[in-house]
Amino acid sequence: MDLNSAVALITGASGGIGAALAEELVKAGARVVLLARRAAKLAEVVDRIGSEHAVAVVGSVTEAGDLQRAVRVAIERFGGLDILVNNAGIGLYGQVENLPADLLLETWKTNLLGAVLAIQAALPALRRSSRALIVNISSVTSITASPSLAGYAMTKAALNLLSETLRKELRQDGIRVLTIFPGYLGNEFADHAYYADDSPMVQRLRTTRPARTSQDAACDIVRAILLDLDEWRYEEELARSQQASSA
């Protein structure tokens, strides 16, 4: 996919993968609309990128009106929309018996309903693009069950199924869907997550920060977009790299 002059809407773009991806997409020639709730953080990202390439929309993925407004901004400011990146998400960790209902609901609303609402808002504009793409940021936790990760992992497993369904529903429209499994990152995501108990896995998540960064993940996502992939998994790429280096 050619990213030159492409227009991307990124949710959860005030930090982490979203902010890093905005920078990498602009480096590749794209222009970006950044949606998030933290106005000051969004302004910092736009300042780094440059207002000629990026525009901020303060809003929540759980509000359909905010997403529709972001799509309108993309059309009015940059002439259309080619890429939707469903990146907004929140972590919820703890053993199933300890997960509060209100936090479960909030996590599902942000991680899954938010993606559905974003897709619904973006589809009319994406159908007018000759290079339309939906990028869903999933998680390796959605593939293999692990203690204390269900609160978050369930939402991402549902997002995986959503991606597969969309590939079938939107194929006739020429809209591609890319699912990203970025691997564990040492970014601010864990700092803003909800923790329902102090189980061993929760303690590990609270105290361990991998060396892999949001910038690393963003570079990988851009590469996957350029390669027109349907799915990209960091763990598989790492295994291939290690096999190649030991050969």
Image: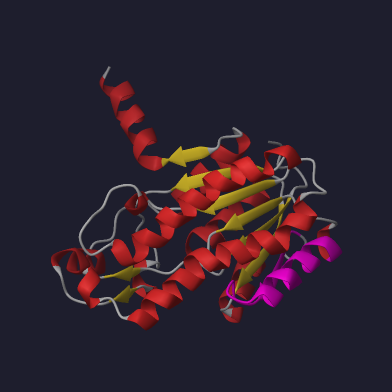
Task: Return the x and y of residue 238 as percentages of the image width and height.
Answer: 34, 35
Q: Quadrant of residue 233?
A: top left
Residue 66 highlighted magenta (yes or no)? yes
Q: Residue furthest top?
A: 247
Residue 69 highlighted magenta (yes or no)? yes
Task: Return the x and y of residue 160 as percentages of the image width and height.
Answer: 47, 50
Answer with left or right where residue 74 lies relative to residue 155.
right
Q: Quadrant of the N terminus?
A: top right
Q: Which residues are magenta?
A: 53-76
Residue 229 or 55: which is nearer the viewer? 229
The residue at the point 62 percent across, 60 percent down is: 10
Residue 13 appears in the figure: no
Numbered disc total: 0
Task: Return the x and y of residue 189 as percentages of the image width and height.
Answer: 40, 67
Task: Return the x and y of residue 138 as percentages of the image width and height.
Answer: 45, 53
The residue at the point 63 percent across, 69 percent down is: 35
Q: Quadrant of the C terminus?
A: top left
Residue 32 appears in the figure: yes
